[in-house]
Every structure is written in C-alpha cells, then in structure tokens.
Image (cartoon, grey):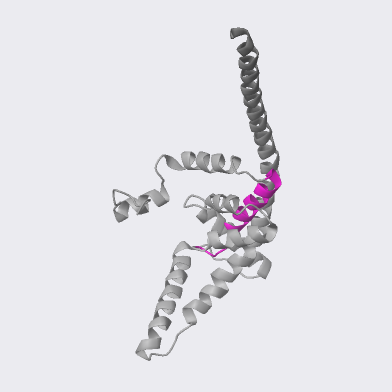
C-alpha cells in the first residue's frame, strides 16, 4: 500500500501517542490551527464547521465524534474538514472537565443528583459494557438478555451527559465561531495581499524583459 507505515508501531506506543502525541499537544494545536487557516472556503463557512466540531466534543458519542461533527457541519452548510479538525478540542486533556461539566449541567437541568465519584462512573461504564457483551452473546447461547446495567448507564450517565452537553457545547461553539471569523478574514486578506504582490512582481519583471528585448536586437 502507498500510505502504509514502514515501521509498525507497538501497541504501547499507539496508546502513548493517543494521550501525548509526538511533539506534544502544543505542536498538535499549531498543526490544527495551520490547517484551519489554509482551508479555501470563506471565513464564515469555515467558522460554522469549527462551531460544529466544538459542539460535538460536548456530546457523549465517543468514537463517533467525526461522524456527528460532519453531519452537524453538513446541516449548517459549514466546512466539514474544519468540523473534523475542531473535534481535536476534545482530547485526553479535556475529556474529564468536559464530561464533568456536561454531567453536572445535565443533572441540574433534569433535577437529579450528580454523584462525582470516578469509581462509580467507571463502574457504570463497565456494567454497560458487560450487559452489551452479554446480550450480544445471548443470541447464540440462549441466555436471557439483561439490560439493567445499560439502563442504569443511560439514566445516570448517557442521557444527563447528552442533555447537559447542549448548553456548554453551544456556548463554546459560539465563542469559537466569533473568534475564528475575524482571525480567518485577517489571515485570508493578508494571504491575498502577499499573492497579489507576488503576481505584480512577476508582471513587472515580464514587462521589463519585454521592454529590454527590442533594444538588444
């Protein structure tokens, strides 16, 4: 394959680079910013894509953030690539605060109690996973399906997270939108200015060569 890696990375290196990419998170952030600035669409369209990506990071659809961000950007007529890049706002450094804010907001809106206990939340994830696996294998083993863990996970984690993530997601997405528009406009104008200056320079050199031509004959 053309894009296949020559050196196969061990599993521990893949995990390590997920939590701390090569060059660090600052370099990764600079790369995302560079890619966003060089997108060819108008600033408002790119900014709508950024809004979609930032909003998506506050949803509980882990593993599907690219799909959700692309769908939201498509509906908003935003730049889909910008939406995908903006989802990197959600990373191992920000997932915990995003999750806590979303869960707290969700339980507050629903009038339920949020128990901030990492062990209990982790236990609910584990129970949901066990139920899912048990119910999938029950099709072949004939055992009765058990939805208790998944039901508890939905009621206490997933649904409050989904409801609670809407408000901070909209706020952060809107802030990102209004910050991105003027920055993108300034960058694109500066880039157009440099391109125009370069074209003018080429044009002047071409005219100078033409004017020198008859005198040499």
Which secondary structure class fits the magenta region best? helix
Residue 186: x and y in percent read: 68, 34
Residue 32: x and y in percent read: 53, 43
Instruction: Look at 44% across and 65% down and name the residue there.
Output: 119
The front one of 106 and 143 is: 143
Q: Residue furthest front?
A: 217
Whether residue 24 is situated above or below residue 98 in the rendered picture: above
Q: Is residue 143 left or right of residue 10?
A: right
Q: Is residue 1 left or right of residue 64?
A: left
Instruction: Look at 66% across and 39% down and name the residue there.
Output: 184
Q: Bounds of the magenta span?
A: 42-62
The front one of 111 and 129 is: 129
Instruction: Look at 41% across and 51% down and name the residue there.
Output: 18
Q: In the picture, which quadrant includes the N terminus? A: bottom left
Residue 27: x and y in percent read: 47, 39
Residue 67: x and y in percent read: 55, 62
Evaluate whether residue 58 shows in this view. Answer: no
Is 120 colored magenta in this rendering? no
The front one of 121 and 29 is: 29
The front one of 82 and 54 is: 82
Evaluate whether residue 120 shows in this view. Answer: yes
């Amino acid at each position: 394959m053309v894009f296949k890696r020559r050196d196969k990375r061990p599993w521990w290196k893949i995990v390590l680079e997920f939590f701390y990419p090569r060059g660090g998170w600052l370099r990764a952030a600079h790369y995302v910013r560079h890619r966003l600035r060089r997108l060819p669409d108008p600033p408002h369209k790119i900014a709508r894509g950024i809004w979609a990506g930032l909003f998506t990071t506050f949803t509980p659809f882990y593993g599907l953030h690219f799909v959700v961000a692309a769908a939201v950007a498509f509906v908003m007529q935003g730049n889909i690539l910008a939406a995908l890049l903006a989802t990197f706002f959600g990373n191992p450094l920000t997932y915990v605060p995003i999750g806590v804010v979303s869960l707290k907001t969700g339980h507050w809106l629903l009038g339920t109690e949020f128990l901030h206990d990492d062990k209990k939340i982790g236990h609910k994830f584990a129970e949901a996973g066990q139920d899912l696996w048990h119910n999938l294998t029950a099709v072949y083993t004939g055992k009765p399906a058990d939805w208790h863990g998944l039901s508890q996970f939905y009621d206490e984690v997933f649904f409050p997270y989904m409801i609670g993530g809407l408000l901070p997601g909209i706020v952060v997405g809107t802030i990102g939108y209004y910050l991105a528009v003027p920055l993108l406009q300034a960058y694109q104008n500066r880039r157009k200015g440099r391109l125009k200056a370069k074209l003018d320079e080429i044009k002047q050199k071409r005219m100078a060569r033409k004017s020198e031509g008859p005198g040499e004959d």
